[in-house]
Image: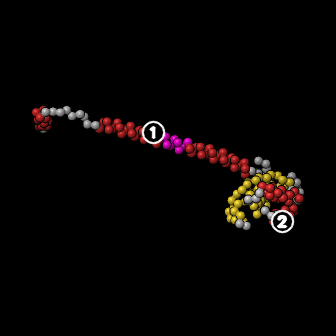
Amino acid sequence: MPELIATGEDTRIYECAILTTYPLPQKDEAALVKEVEGYFEEVGAKLVSKDAWGRRGLAYPIKGIKEANITIYYYEMDPLKLKEVDQSLKIAKGVLRHLFVKPPKHYQVVKYSDAYEQWLKERESVDQKRTREKQAALEEKVAAKARRKVQMKSTEKKAEPKAVEKMSGEEVTKSIDKLITDDLDSL
């Protein structure tokens, strides 16, 4: 990104944020932008950078308007001419608000549009990562449920009682007698 350095001794670089009314017909909007840039050209200002942010919602309504087009300009100009441009912007029809700021030394211009594009790419990758994590968590849940089912089936098989052989009355009596005698012998 370009660093803002004034080329002349008697000039400075200024950042100017301009809010213009929204919705304007495209033809009127182009005329308003040309008019605003003409104010700077009249005083001999040199355009360093321009960053159109586009339509944005306002924190509070200005003259009943809730949205505005925002444009950020960086101009190199004589500080004595700043008041003249300021007065012109105050009376310009279609300009809701404007603000001049003198950026600090070694200030780097970062265009909002470029930063926004980068943010979209990062957000996309973050969204993809979240989707992959959700998918992996879901797969793990399905696998754990399948393991539990298999484990339950294997314990059910172990717990099944052995098949009981049918015995006659005499055999039952002999088995009971044998158990009783075994218990007595052990005493």
The kind of residue on which mark 1 rests is: Ala
**Camera-side residue of 50 and 7:** 50
First reached walking from the N terminus: tag 1 or tag 2? 2
Residue drawn 77% across and 57% down? 25
Q: Is residue 135 magenta?
A: yes
What span is in magenta? 132-140
Residue 106 tag number? none
Quadrant where the C terminus sits is top left
**Camera-side residue of 110 and 146:** 146
Q: In which quarter of the view is residue 159 placed?
A: top left
Q: Position of residue 66 (x, y in %)?
A: 69, 62
| In the depicted structure, whether residue 132 falls above or below residue 26 | above
Callout 2 crowding tier (Cα within 10 Å): few <14, some 14–19, many ≥20: few
Q: Position of residue 161 (x, y in %)?
A: 26, 37
- Residue 33 in sight: no
Residue under pointer 2: 87
Q: Secondary structure at mark 1?
A: helix
Q: In which quarter of the view is residue 175 placed?
A: top left
- Residue 22 in sight: yes
Residue 143 tag number? 1
Q: Position of residue 93 (x, y in %)?
A: 80, 64
Label 1 to label 2: alpha-carbon separation: 71 Å
Residue drawn 32% across and 38% down? 156
